[in-house]
Image: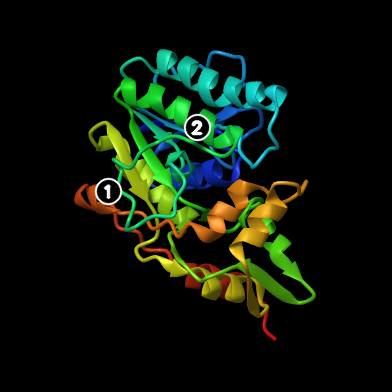
Amino acid sequence: MRVVVTGASGFCGAAVARLAAAAGHEVVCLGRRPGPVGTHVPWDAGRDVPVVAGADAVVHLAAAVGDPRAGRVVEAAYRAVNVGGTARLLKAAGGVPVVWVSSASVYRPGPYDGAVREDHPVGAQRNAYGRTKAAGERLALDAGAVVVRPRAVYGDGDRHLLPRLRRVVRGGTAWLPGPDVAMSLTAVENLASACLTAVGWPGGAYNIADAEPYRRDDVLGRALGVPVRHVPVRLVRGLASVSPVLSRYAVDQLTDGMVLDLGRAWERGYRPRAALSDYLVRTTPER
């Protein structure tokens, strides 16, 4: 196939582009910067109409990401990319199959009684990222696209998840809002595989994550290489309301215990093979 990958210079987009090239597809990378493989076609997702002529499939990963502070300027900047960029891409794609990479951040914040399915309410997001991803996702679903919802993507080249987690370390200890919870994480290899496999799936939303959930304290203790101690959740939520670096969204990620139900993707052949242990073996230095 001729596969167009938007946002291919980013962490997740680069993984999709490399996997598509390794599978023998012709890869076209749309974005402000070149991707790791294939042909580069410049595109500013915040204002321009993309060129996708001749594509057999489009995997859309270009997005404004992160956990920004509230404000109209920030909200507008995120909306220009995550909503406006989506609208322009869908119009340009026409009848070409589109896989739109969303996020589990679109789900209503927990805590959760059980595994979160795709019919869980979407709304009440904590920040501009969640709100604008949810709005862009709605456009994609209405257009019949396949929407994949990964949670907490990690892997080689990650510039967001693990750096954010390292902020909880003080004095050689990871201070976490207790108690320990189960949570889904997504290896970037599993997300990339899902994106390419999903080209042939029926339109709709699909949760994507590693095969099994993890225990938060075990993950952070192993990934950060420090002991874990608990602090009261109420105290941390109070700090998040006044802290310039700690947000309510970040606290939710550590306390809500979101485990994704993968049943819909599993029925379509999704088989996540990478796991956190593989990543830690590559990145944890010998002591």
Q: Mark 2 belongs to which amino acid?
A: Lys
Residue 112 occupies which quadrant of the picture?
bottom left
Observer-nearest residue: 76 or 90? 76
Location of residue 155 with respect to 278 vertically, above or below: above
Viewer can see residue 4: yes
Give x and y (percent) for residue 227: 65, 80
Residue 107 occupies which quadrant of the picture?
top left
Report the disc number at residue 265: 1
Residue beneath label 2, please? 133
Give x and y (percent) for residue 118: 31, 43
Viewer can see residue 45: no
Residue 198 occupies which quadrant of the picture?
top left
Location of residue 40 with respect to 84 vertically, above or below: below
Report the disc number at residue 170: none
Coloring basis for residues: rainbow
Q: Mark 1 belongs to which amino acid?
A: Ala
Q: Secondary structure at mark 2?
A: helix
The residue depicted at 60 percent of the width and 20 percent of the height is 80
